[in-house]
Amino acid sequence: MSMKSFILSGLLVSIATASLDLSSLRDQVKAIFYHAYNGYLDHAFPYDELRPLSCDGIDTWGSYSLTLVDALDTLAVLGNQSEFQRVSEILIDRLDFNVDLNVSVFETNIRVVGGLLSAHLMAQKVGVDVDERWPCDGPLLKLAVDLARRLLPAFNTRTGMPYGTVNLKRGVDPNETPITCTAGVGTFIVEFATISRLTGDQVFEKVALRALKALHNRRSKIGLVGNHIDVQSGRWTALDSGVGAAVDSYFEYLVKGAILLDKPELMEMFKEYISPIEKHIKHGDWYMWVNMDSGSVTQAMHQSLDAFWPGLQTLYGDADSAYKTLLNYYSVWRKYGATPEFYSIPHAAPYTNREGYPLRPELIESTMYMYRVNKDPMLLEFGNSALHSINVTSRTECGFASIKDVQDHTLDNRMESFFLAETIKYLYLLFDPGNPLLSTMKGATIRRFKNGEECLLGAGGYVFNTEAHPMDVSSLHCCDTMRKEMQKSEIYKILQDYDPEDIFQVSNLTRDLNPGPFSKTSRNNNQHKEGFNISAQPMSCSRQPFHMKLSKYGQIFTDD
Ligand code: DMJ
């Protein structure tokens, strides 16, 4: 065993490093996954989430069997082909989005649309007998398109920025609040452009781009964006600017959208934020919260969600700065064995009522990106210690529980679906640096279509959506060559059934969206799940500045 030392916030931090057995670590991650996954199947399916203390299920973000959808591509990453196939069939058979339910546009997109798309794109690799037009068609893609179509009415606003909540059957409620958080506006390009490029229907990419640009055009004089915006008037309603909660994935999707679509324009937009962020938000190697107009600090706070930022910095090429920030974030984790949702930097303590750790992935995600760049064994040590903390602190009889308070390690009855989609996947990939998802060309295949066209798949690396669902960059280019063939397909006919320009013209979208042949008979969820309370959480972010109200453990505060 050797020691590594760092100067961190004036303290000498020493971390023991030893050579780790990656294969054994991967097995330990798998064991965590299957304990949680089997617990969900045994006690919670078909509900969205497992409640790991009461060992039952609950619908949270909709009525999607969300944990199963979110975990599907993790099964593929862990190499479980038979279970991937079995679950794909169950989902294809059961999922029906033609339900009268208000849902978060953001969460539905990143978790469900994203999960279905990545599973669709991985299907062949996992041994599924794919359609002859795959990846330009297929049952999981059809589900993703059907669901994404039901989100489109949210984008029908004066600014092009979407509402935060939509009814899957009826569109946007006429009384819906027009206040959406920044991430809720700017986190669509990865999934929506993937759909557009695979199917040839441009409306998805178009609305996502329009929303991104509308947001960017409303940055303040000092170049920052706020926390919440009125999507009809374009007026900022919460002026706190930072890189964490309610903003985070807007920045992430500028970078990832640029990479996925080979669109330098998006990277240029992102780059315009770097200097204002460094000047106003970055203090030392921490990122705080400031007023978007003045740049003055409003909260000297580190949020657990901020921890994705070093990973994003690594992705766009600023690994040195990223590593210093990562070390600061580790110092908080090491203190508690987890990161509290909000941590006061000057007081070196969690904020009251924000002491929890809901099994979030961000610090592990950034660690994985950083390890790809510098291969520092200390990063594996961190992964190892995170694995053990989670196993020791959060494990329950039927799953893994969120930590209610990192100071005393009391638990909360919640296991968010991102634990299986993201936290475990990034931990596994950290310990599996040769995985084809992290390489270019490794595992690339040639797809030959019936019409004689061919294209390369799995060749250009993968872009992970913000819920860790990998999108195969090369597949996006593949379907152009298939376009003529596509015109004969079922999916194409369905897309012809409606006019994409509707989204920019129709003002009253409470009409039935005519879901078309994708949908099955509408089910009555209460009948399916007798004895349970179904309560979807329609917004993914608070409508108020975070110092007044903010989501705790993923819960939602509405104005009521
Ligand atoms: C995930 O749903 C996504 O990563 C999102 O962008 C932010 N929050 C959670 C995980 O913490």
Image (tube, helix red, strand yellow):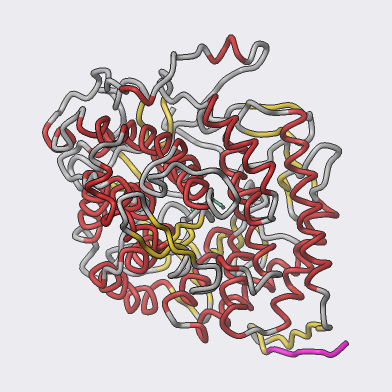
What residue is drawn where x is 60% and y is 85%?
A: 374
Q: Which residues are magenta?
A: 1-6
**Residue 222 appears in which quarter of the rendering?**
bottom left
- What residue appears at the point 49 percent right and 73 percent down from the top-left corner? 441
Locate residue 480, reporting x and y percent: 26, 55
Front-most of residues 9 and 357: 357
Q: Quadrant of the N terminus?
A: bottom right
The secondary structure making up most of the magenta span is strand
Residue 264, x across and y down, in percent: 26, 72
Q: Is 157 placed left or right of 259 in the picture?
A: left
**Left or right of residue 253, residue 69 in this image:** right
Is residue 285 depicted above or below 461 in this figure? below
Total label count? 0
* Vertical position of residue 498 compared to residue 279: above or below: above
Point 66% across, 68% down: residue:
348
Q: Residue furthest left?
A: 505
- Indicate the quadrant where residue 231 lies: top left
- Name the foreground residue: 357 vs 1: 1
Instruction: Say if residue 223 shows up in the picture.
Output: no
The C terminus sits in image quarter: top left
Q: Is residue 16 magenta?
A: no
